[in-house]
Amino acid sequence: MVALRPGSAAFEAAFGAALSEYDTFKSEFPSHQELQNAWLDPSVGASFGLDRFDTTAAHQARDLHTGSRLLLFDLATDFGTEITKFNNYPSGLLGGLKSVIDATPIGTALSERDVADIFDAASKGNAGKVVATVTLGVGLAAVGTAIPVVGQIGAAIAALVTGIVKIIKARKAKQDAHDAAVREAMYRSFPPLQTADSVTDSGLVQNQVRTTLQTQDWTRLFLPRFKGEWVGIERDRGFAFAQGQVDKWSDEFAGDEGEAFVPSGGVGLIPGTTILTSVIQVNLDPRGAAFKAFLNRGSDPRGAYSHTNPVSGAQYIIDTGSFYPATARLAGLAWEWATKPGSPYLYRLDCIRMHAEWLACCEAGIDYLRERVFPWWGKNLNGDGTIKSRNLEGFFGAAVYYGVGSWACQTLGGTNLHPIYTKFDTPTGYFREEMKTSNLYPGSLYSGPFLPILDTPSKGFQSCMGTIYYRNPAIYDTLNALQKRQRHNLKYSLVSAYVRRSDAAFAGDAGLQSLLDDMRALLLKSEARMAINMLDVPEGERHNGKDWRAQLLESGVPKVPSRFGIQARLSAGDGKPEEPEPDLPPLRVGNPVPPAWDDPPVRRGRQDRDADPAVMGDDPPPLWTRERAMVAGIGGFGALFAAGWALSKVYKRKSGPL
């Protein structure tokens, strides 16, 4: 691992002499307020280019290019400060780093084919190779990003742009921002709850992602944004839900009455994905026509659309993490780089802490549903059908399942009143938008994760309420696989020479730290030590009270690595054959389009099981290709990326995994 000092020849060869371009990340994407203004006034949308794919796509692609260059700059630069004194970068990837820094500039307008070409990491057979002039996709592959992941990131950009352009182009005339119906309709796509916009997105990248990557602990990027019990607060024409305490007004999470959720320090990226989760917003006006009609014995607005309900229930929900696309993609790249076999960055992830906080988040969400949502209707319904209390949190709070839930069953018989549920094995589950499909529970096609609960559900229904910890996207299995890779790499690779005992994984796991010490002792006696690259061994690191670099040199490790690139594997020292490399699920690039932007669902018959969105455990569909993107107009993102991977372990919890 090397650190490049500004002013040195190696630094200038990698980054050039103009350092000011690495100072600040500023997203080119329009702010949330600008998106609202564009929705209200088509001329504003046109002025920002939001009614055109080419302009909006260029903004998104340029953000990713700029952000990835900044992250690599932060990882590889010796800033000469106390907090960044451990900055380093694998010497073998410096050529790839330069490929990203020098990647072909991205213009101010891109066609769909241009987006496909930029993120084609296998372009002209250059996959993972260092060449003089490359696209961003080839450069990202050269620093360790999987080729399919690069392509899926490109597809995600195209999907988000397509969704925005579709919404803006649908506006035919200027709207009155003060009209209640207009504001209610606007808030379904762009809620007013906080400054969840490109300014906040830029701030998260600049002040959390970039600063975190300059430390030995990257865990916070992959922790929930909030801690504690789930709570709900009413906001302008809707409700918002998150964990933790509600405090006074803040710029980030502000409500009408000056209430705000207090962040815990996590960034909110679900481990193994590019899905950033934050405040769950329900954009159903408790004083609007749809809810008033419901109180007058009309249909439940969490269900199907009707003459009083303009959209289906699932489309009222937005995770405000959707408005942080740059943060999600760049933190996702950090996960991808860290989790590669043999990566020293793998040990900057504290899996024990991630296990605890995501399990607590999911259990708190299910507890909220049982304690606040299940009994609400019975406690608040008068004999004449009216509501006793205007505290509607228990009704709207069913949306918390969108934040923590992964539906575990399918109905295979019975009636709507008494369905027969068949439960999938873990980790199979329907997650978020995937729940907008038929035959999961009565009305699931329209309600999706906005569970239409009006009484304590049957035991069968409750047993189907799985969580994202155990089921799709299966945080538990992802973290278990990551821990297995951490141990395997210590046993069978040379990575123990390149990490620090103070890295987050060792600080949080005494057993892993003990394994590190054992493998270093073994390495000093193994012939494999001759393949160690001393350029990547950290300075100031100690082993058994002595300087680690000095011990390696004394054992005969050459100061300069062989130009022939000797390859060696370390034996675990137990006389057993090497265990196979543990599989780690590939980074799952999430659908960036909020459900509120989707078209109404299409009803599917009971026999159309194969046409339903894929779930965890199904065979994944073909990856996004240029040809498919051209034919489909890059519109079917969910079908392309809903399928993922499956492992089969079961983890004990107080009530058993759902």
Image (cartoon, helix red, strand yellow):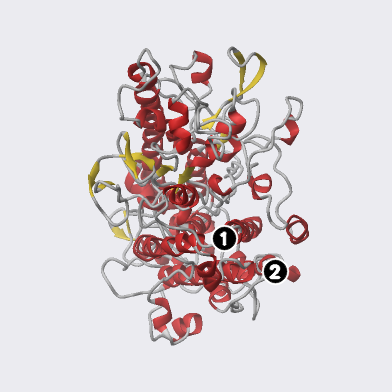
Nearer mark to the viewer, of 1 and 2 = 1
Label 1 Cα crowd, 10 Å radius (few <14 / some 14-19 / many 20+): many
Which image quarter is the N terminus in? bottom left
Q: Is residue 376 above or below residue 261?
A: above
Compute the Cα span from label 1 to label 2. 26 Å
Q: Position of residue 162 (x, y in %)?
A: 62, 59
Question: Which circle's residue, 1 or 2, is located before the other in the chain?
Answer: 2
At mark 1, the secondary structure is helix
* Extreme residue in the left direction: 248
Q: Nearer the viewer, residue 540 or 184?
A: 184
For disc 1, the marked residue is: 168
User: Is residue 201 in view?
Assistant: yes
At mark 2, the secondary structure is helix
User: Is residue 511 in view?
Assistant: no
**Amino acid type of disc 2?**
Asp
Q: Position of residue 335 (x, y in %)?
A: 49, 54
Relative to residue 365, is residue 647 drawn left or right?
Answer: right
For disc 2, the marked residue is: 117
Q: Nearer the viewer, residue 81 or 115?
A: 115
User: Which residue is pictured at 26% across the width and 54% down the height?
Assistant: 250
Q: How many marks?
A: 2
Q: Is residue 451 above or below residue 511?
A: above
User: Which residue is pictured at 30% across the width and 36% down the height?
Assistant: 228
Q: Position of residue 461 (x, y in %)?
A: 52, 19
* Residues marked 1 and 2 touching at CB (< 8 Å): no
Q: Nearer the viewer, residue 596 or 205?
A: 596
Label 2 Cα crowd, 10 Å radius (few <14 / some 14-19 / many 20+): some
Relative to residue 43, is residue 222 drawn left or right?
Answer: left
Q: Is residue 104 above or below residue 284?
A: below
Q: Nearer the viewer, residue 365 or 194?
A: 194
Q: Position of residue 651 (x, y in %)?
A: 47, 27
